[in-house]
Image: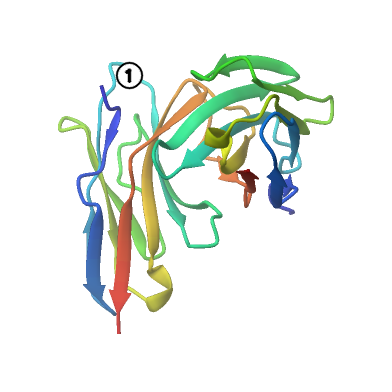
Amino acid sequence: AQKITQTQPGMFVQEKEAVTLDCTYDTSDPSYGLFWYKQPSSGEMIFLIYQGSYDQQNATEGRYSLNFQKARKSANLVISASQLGDSAMYFCAMREDTELSFGAGTTVTVRA
Amino acid sequence: KAGVTQTPRYLIKTRGQQVTLSCSPISGHRSVSWYQQTPGQGLQFLFEYFSETQRNKGNFPGRFSGRQFSNSRSEMNVSTLELGDSALYLCASSPMGGQGSTGELFFGEGSRLTVL
C-alpha cells in the first residue's frame, strides 16, 4: 500500500496567490516525521519544511506552512504569495525509522 | 556550512559496466542515505548508513551496494549495469536519522547516470 499519497499531479497558480498541495500518509508507527521538498528542473532536492508527529503546532518556514491534521493523517503544504521561482515539482515524504517514503509529487506552475 | 556534495554529477556508462558514486555529507552529519529517482518508479530508498554500518536497505537487487567511511563519506556501487539503472541517484545526510532524530535531512544535487 502507498505510504504517501499526493493526489494532485499538477497545479497552476497565479503569481502572488496561495496554493495548497495535498498529502496524506499511512503509518501505524506513533513516531514519524513529515517533510516537504521542492525539486526544480535541475534535479536538486530542496528541503522546505518538517513536521514531527509529536509536534503540537503546525510548522512554518517563511512562505511555507504545513497544515498537519494527525487524526486525518494529512500534511498539506501551503505556499503563500506564490512567486515564479516556485514553479517546480513538490514531494511530500515521511520518515519512519531510517527510511524516507515519497509521494509521486505535484508539479506546480506559477503563472505571471 | 557546506551542503551535501555528490560526485560525479553526470556520467554515461554502457550495459555490463559498473559505477561508483560518492557522497560527502554535511559536516557533523553521521547518517547517509541513498535514493534512486526514475520517471516510472519515482523516488525509492536504496540504503542508509550510520557510523559505517548499514542500518536499513530497500528492495533493490544485490548489484546495488554501498559503504560508509569513518569520516561519514559514503559511496554506492552498481555492478553489471542495466538500462533500467538509468536514474538520478540522490544522497541525503542527517545528524542521526531514525527515531528521535530532528527534521534535518538534506539532499545533494544528485548524480545523473545514463546507461547505454
Q: Position of residue B102 (x, y in %)?
A: 52, 34
For the residue marked with disc 1, what is the amino acid?
A: Pro
Q: Residue furthest right?
A: B70
To which residue does mark 1 refer?
A: A30
Q: Nearer the viewer, residue A8 or A36?
A: A8
Horizontally, residue A54 falls left or right of residue B71, namely: left
Question: In the picture shown, does residue A21 fall above or below B76?
Answer: below
Q: Residue at x 76, y 19 (%)?
A: B52
Q: Residue furthest left?
A: A72
Query: Which quadrant holds residue A44?
Result: bottom right
Horizontally, residue B85 falls left or right of residue B50, namely: left
Horizontally, residue A9 falls left or right of residue B32, namely: left
Q: Residue at x 52, y 51 (%)?
A: A45
Q: Nearer the viewer, residue B1 or B108?
A: B108
Counting the numbered discs, the total is 1
Question: In the picture shown, does residue B8 fall above or below B65?
Answer: below
Q: Residue at x 56, y 36 (%)?
A: B83
Q: Nearer the viewer, residue B41 or B24?
A: B41
Q: Nearer the viewer, residue A66 or A58?
A: A66
Q: Residue A18: in sight, yes or no?
A: no
Q: Position of residue B67 (x, y in %)?
A: 74, 22
Circle 1: element type: loop
Q: Residue at x 38, y 68 (%)?
A: A87
Question: In the picture shown, does residue A25 fall above or below A60?
Answer: above
Q: Chain of mark 1?
A: A
Q: Residue furthest bottom?
A: A112
Horizontally, residue A10 falls left or right of residue B86, namely: left
Q: How is the image coloured?
A: rainbow
Q: Position of residue A7 (x, y in %)?
A: 20, 45
Where's the N terminus of chain A, which quadrant? top left
Query: Which quadrant holds residue A112?
Result: bottom left
Q: Position of residue A93 (x, y in %)?
A: 39, 38
